[in-house]
Image (spheres, helix red, strand yellow):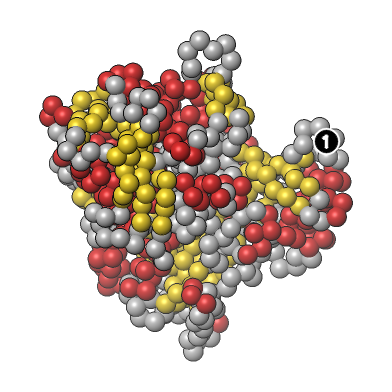
Amino acid sequence: MMLSKKLTTLQISLFNISNMLTPIALMFAISMGMSGCKEHHDSGSSTTVIPPENSASDDSSLKIIHINDHHSHLDEERMEFDLNTGSTSGTYSVSRGGFARVSALFNQLAMGHGAILKLHAGDATTGDLYYNLTKGKADADVMNMICFDAFTLGNHEFDNKDQGLKYFIDALDQGDCPTRTAILSANVEFGPSSPLYQSTRIQKSTVIETQGQKIGLVGLTIAQKTKNASQPNPDTLFKDELESAQQQIDLLRQAGINKIILQSHVGYEMDKYLATQLHGVDVIVGGDSHTLLGSQNLEKVGMTPEAPYPTTLQNKDGDPVCIVQAWQYSYVVGELDITFDSQGRVKNCQGTPHILIGDDFKPKLTSAPALTHDQQLNIAKQLHLLAPEITVIEPDSRTSQILSPYRDMKEKFRQTIVATAQEILCLRRVPGTQRDINRSSLGNVCNQDERVNRYGGDIQQLVAEAFLQQGKTYFSAQLSILNGGGVRTDVEQGPISVEKVYQVLPYNSTLVQLNMQGNEIKATLEDAVDAVITLNNTGSYPYTAGLRWSVDFNQPKGQRISNIELKDSSGEYSLLMMDQTYRVVTLDFLANGSDYYHTLATIRNERRIDVGLDYAEAFMKYLEADGLSQPRALFRLPVSNYSTQYFIDRPL
């Protein structure tokens, strides 16, 4: 018998959970009392939610089950954690996430309850071979095993232009759900070139009735980031988030709807800002920033929550707003329980960000003996005691069956090993100890790495080097330019497969040759860091190969990048000449001016040549070193080759 099949009875007796609403099999007890909405934890202040003077019989309850940013991560992964609890002390691994677990928990949490909404806050696609191979069909099929009530457009839904978005929506509409998933975005307007022009399929807002309650939902898509860091059609417009949201909230209130949820894909910081600036909003279910919310107990298992789940603020009317987000990559299912008074104001909210894991615990040391059943039970018990958010659940068999043919397709392609990482190659967009410091999926081994803090991401630097080498092959390139957000994941020590390459570089980008003067190169770097400083767009932070510099965020734009040095064919560095022309390899995405690389968009006509080589393929060509009988061995590059040589941040 599987371990997870024995957990329900065990957990109830061990943890004395007497208030479980339903006997949810195969998962740890749901902590319903954490981070209630009676306190505002932001900035250390406290805001009391004062119940209105009405009887409890006038109250109404709503359960929201939600995810965001699963990015085509449909398979489970392995996660490592440390236990320091006597006989069970050690480092272990266990399966984590996977959409079949997401589906299982959604369906179990929804079973037997009253008013429920099932929401997805955007970025369903792009990030794994499932998207590269199926263009969103696999994502749509497994999402239809949940039958979401509403889905918000994320910026990555536009990565394959508006046509790619339409293909995904059409696939979603082919499911057997009783009602179609509402597709929402209040601030997107499709232009005449878009296949979604004048379509009514995507709505600005909608009203969903559940158990007699009418709930208004407003969708929101991050505007500047989508226009500048994705590939929507040129005439598809993204309007101001605050104005667009308020317009729809006002319309809903005029129609008599007094419970309003903002289903946003704008990031946690923007969600907090919107909460304080909007009239009439009650709940914000967010995405985009991949923010882990939860109790500080998660730090005991190697995770770093940014704030409580839920986070509570006050809207422009002085009423409470509950804000939630569910991290990333099918790792978390958020469960939020809200009580409204008779006027539709939030009276209380509480919930759990369920960290989904399996029961297949293994010691990290391969030489260690396999764990006994009792040892696995004990580890499960200790994990729950350390962090009640940890939820053991068995994958949904029907979702696994739907995914099976896609998994076979992926497996055939993913097997090829193209290199071996001799050490961890950490992901980090911006150096320093203030910005983007929780980016790594490998946790503190990268997030707190001194070298990463000083110089930035290892894997970004290696990808930039790979592009330069391919640029040299095609047109004798002298340097490469890459945005840090174009590289999506760390590389663990060990074999690097085709699948891993496409996880690192999942987008549809190709290499471009640009002939640029030194002053244009400097202006490009200034553009990129300005977006980091003024817009908190960490993904635009630049990485180059063949070029290095110092950066000081305290200086005004135009003076932040200094000591720019170019590496010559002999390996020596000398100052970049502002009036000299250089051969640059970059991505078509950046060459079009996206991600705030505005200067690159001015390099046109004969100064731009589209190489046409897929950027993931370019990386694989670099990894597949000629003449070697074994996969190429990869190490961190020497620090002298890192583009950021000296970094000074400014106080946030």
Instruction: Quickly name the residue at label 1.
Output: 368
Left or right? Give the position of 216 relative to 101. left
Q: In the picture, which quadrant includes the C terminus?
A: bottom left
Image-based side of 622 in relation to 100, left or right: left
Report the residue that reaches farthest toward the bottom: 53
Taking depth in this image into account, of 363 and 348 the one nearest to the observer is: 363
User: Picture coordinates of residue 95 (x, y %)?
Assistant: 66, 41
Q: In terms of secondary structure, where does tag 1 sit?
A: loop
Foreground of the two, 209 or 47: 47
Picture quadrant of residue 33: bottom right
Q: Quadrant where the N terminus lies? A: top right
Q: Is residue 548 visible?
A: yes
Amino acid of disc 1: Ala
Q: Residue at x 60, y 51 (%)?
A: 444
Q: Residue at x 64, y 59 (%)?
A: 298
Q: Position of residue 247 (x, y in %)?
A: 25, 66
Regarding residue 228, the answer to whether it shows in the image is no
* Side of 34 relative to 525 (left or right): right
- Residue 521 or residue 209, whichever sits in front: 521
Q: Count up the numbered dots.
A: 1
Of the pair 321 and 581, the residue shown nearer to us: 581
Q: Position of residue 401 (x, y in %)?
A: 58, 31
Give the answer, above or below, for where 146 lies relative to 627. below
Q: What residue occupies the far left of the structure in this picture? A: 605
Residue visible at 75% across and 45% down in the picture: 91
Q: Residues within 10 Å of mark 1 (few under 14, many from 20)?
A: few
Q: Is residue 269 above or below residue 515?
A: below
Q: Residue at x 85, y 46 (%)?
A: 375
Question: Residue 275 placed where, x, y %?
Answer: 38, 70
